[in-house]
Image: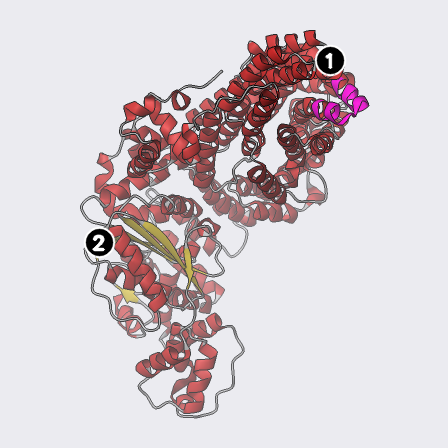
Amino acid sequence: MRGGNGRSVAPSPILGRRNVTDRLAALIGAARGGAGGALVLRGEAGIGKSALLRHAEGMATGFRIMRASGAEFEMELPYAALHQLCVPALDRLGTLPVRHRGALEVAFGLEAGTPDPFLVGIATLELLAEAAGDRPLLCAVDDAQWLDHASARALAFLARRLGAEKVIMLAATRTPSRTSELDGLPGLTVEGLAADDARALLAAEVRAPLDERVRDRILAEARGNPLALLELPRSVGPTGMAGGFVPPDAAPLAGRIERSYQDRLERLPDPVRQLLTLAAAEPVGDPALLWRAAAELGLDASNAGPAQASSLIQFDARVRFPHPLARSAVYRAADPERRRAAHRALAAATDPGTDPDRRAWHRAQAAAGPDEEVAAELRRSASRARARGGVAAAAAFLERSAALSLDPEQRVERGLDAARAKFDAGAFDVAAELLTGIQSGSLGEEQLARIDLLRGELSFVLHRGGDAPHVHVLRAARRFAALDPERSRACYLDAVEMGALIGGLREVVDAARAAPPAGARGGSGDIVLDAMITLVRDGHRAAVPALRPVLADVRDPVWSRRPSLGVLLAIELWDFDGFLDFADHTIAAGRESGSFHTLPIGLAMLGAVSVHAGDFATAMGAITEGAAVAEATGASPLVYPSVHLAALRGRRKAATDLFAEVLAADQRMTLSVHWANAVLHNALGDYRTAFHSARRAIAHDDLAVTGLALPELVEAAVRCGEHEAASGALESLAERTQASGTAWGLGVESCARALVTGDEDAYRRAVDHLDGCRAAVHRARAHLLYGEWLRRQGRRRDARERLRTAHELLSRIGAEAFAARAAAELQGTGERARGRAPHSYERLTMQEVHIARLVATGATTKDVAARLFLSPRTIDAHLRNVFRKLGITSRRQLRDLPELRDRPG
């Protein structure tokens, strides 16, 4: 890799790139004014992306320039490119908060530990902001298609957060690229030069006489690619340029350019070619390392002159090739033994104390066949990489370790470890490929079980495969039964969670009846597994007594591993406090551990429970923060809290558009969307649509969603005159709620019973139960339903009181469709509903709501920046927008807005 710090120099004119240079000039001008940004230049090899980066550096007069670049044959070291970019600014590390400074020191290998990707991202943003303190900063990242994954993710994170900084990030990446992290960033495809510009460039660069037919052929074959226009004439040679016969070449353009470089290489003496191969195999570009390795091969500095004269390489502060295709051409031109010799020399020249992993990588490349010593060394490198948070690096080391393992047993074990590491690194397709490559004929039951378990997890995240995910996990559970009964039961419980989340719970539970019995020291996981079997087989009354005490302890290890199952059971048992406790604890655990798997789960839980608590502002904040975490980690955000919010907010078009979008992305959300559609259309008074949606939502008797959908079905069925359906749904609901005995469940059931029977005492019980519960939406809806019933009984005065309360509660919550329904009912009693000022958050974006709430509760700008992975300057810019939209001028005034400060209960 190459990198550095520098000042810009005046740019030379660049031919035929006006559209790109205008875009670059606009970015540079905006950054001078304090509004940063990012742009990814995409295009084929040789199209001129690197030249455009250099041109941008020249345009950025007065800017500080920081550079980094990927290299094709570089090993996967976590944060290598990010470190390279930040080296010129490391003298400013001391200005960062202690935790953020420590995160970068660990990521860059300056201190021991495991880096936190959240803190690394925000700390790098702060570091670059510091570097741009006295003058704007341009970060130029070339050959981004070869960045290590940790750096690519961090740079994508940074690029999305530069709007309020005097920082530009420009990246050049070849298409197609293996680096998907940059795909969502603003980009520009660099096309071939127009015909006149291509002709002008060829004429300017080729001074020798050029036959017109040859010129036309070169122009046609180059297709406007500037590097091809420079290199193809070399491949034609003097005879060809003068009009001699040269047969056409159908090879791909990049291959043609590489061959032009190889033609030059072939004309060089063998020692010079050997030196160039060594340089191509050494991706760092470190001259000292190169010459130590050259000495191992008996090469001396006398070969540097001819090598540099060939224009294939430049020896400077860094050893550089003129283009990645030149480096690739040199490396590929060497026979396998010469490449291995180069890597052996580089391994010998690399200090095993200071850089053991690079030494191991070179030794692996030097191996001609299985080598147990090298395989073991690679496994140790994998352990070190994982400790530094480099799961992708660990996976690469393990994959090569497996390939070099001489012992068949070790080869299988390392292959399984590599597949698991690839899965942990998010390389799901590669993990699946590695599993396929493991020879199953010689495997034992334990290894087969591990394969089944990983296949189930892959199927779960990839949403594809012939069998449902739990089928594989159940197979693993059966294999483990005789070998490790405890692990077998854990697999059965994992399959239960999968079935609860994506369907197939009854099938899973039926299979789990064959689980080995719990041991004498059976734990909470055993209790939950047995209780789930009882729940499906014998119903809630039989299962709830065993589940309730385990659910009461949200810190129990069974929930640490399976938080989603815990929260689904809390909803199934109508335990609102448990619902909220799971959300709070999962968020706290995620923040404490830095787990980018746990935190978004907890935020999604908080978003959903806050919707039902009537705290839409907190829900919006949780959704916003969850999206920020997803963006920071490259994961997909969990959408179900947004579905809940849209349903209860009651904006028809926004909700139905979201539902359609969610279903298009993930069919596993179907039942949740049916529930949400039932809620929405009950609120809008479209009871027939609500009835059909609710029936679909309960069709598979899924955990949690069926319970939530049953009261919607009762309400819609009563309004549609479907009394048999209403009675059946009430009976099913009561079986759940009476077993749990919670205020939330008993209140909802009493309300449903009142709808079916017309019993006023049931309405009163519903209100009494729910008035003591934090489920504010159901409380408000109970008042609404009671008021509607009273009005239909002709008791207008009594109806007004209930409907007035319902309208006030629903309006305060922001449940617009239900509030409109309450207002219409109130008007039917002869009273006009009081108008209510719009919520403060109605004028703000979801992100602004979250920032405003955090500030209103006393958080500093830096606190909020760290929480949302933004820079302090960006937070201040958002706050200025908040102040303007709300017509206020200070943080103190934010604290005076109760709907932004308090969590309603």
In this rendering, the answer to whether 901 lies above or below 118 is above
Residue in the foreground of this view, choosing between 119 and 761 = 761
Helix, strand or loop for disc 1: loop
Q: Residue at x 55, y 19 (%)?
A: 831
As drawn, the residue found furthest toward the front would be 830
Dividing the image into 4 quarters, which one contains the N terminus?
bottom left
Residue 710 placement: quadrant:
top right
Q: Nearer the viewer, residue 693 or 637?
A: 693
Quarter of the image for residue 541 reads top right
Colour logic:
secondary structure
The image shows residue 699 at horizontal and vertical percentages of 75, 30
Check if residue 749 falls in the magenta segment. no
Q: Out of 464 and 475, give the one closest to the viewer.
A: 464
Mark 1, Cα crowd under 10 Å, few <14 / some 14-19 / many 20+, is: some
Q: Position of residue 849 (x, y in %)?
A: 41, 31
Residue at left 41%, top 65%?
190
Image coords of residue 26 (percent x, y):
30, 58
The segment highlighted magenta reads 715-730
**Predominant SS of the magenta segment:** helix
Instruction: Identify residue for label 2.
Output: 63
Badges 2 and 1: C-beta atoms under 8 Å apart?
A: no
Locate residue 17 relative to residue 740 in the image: left or right. Answer: left
The kind of residue tagged 2 is Phe
Can you tell which of label 2 and label 1 is closer to the viewer? 1
Percent x, y for residue 668? Answer: 65, 37
Distance between the Cα atoms at labels 2 and 1? 75 Å
Residue at (70% x, 23% y) in the render? 715
Q: Which residue is mark 1?
A: 758
Query: Does residue 717 belong to the magenta stretch?
Result: yes
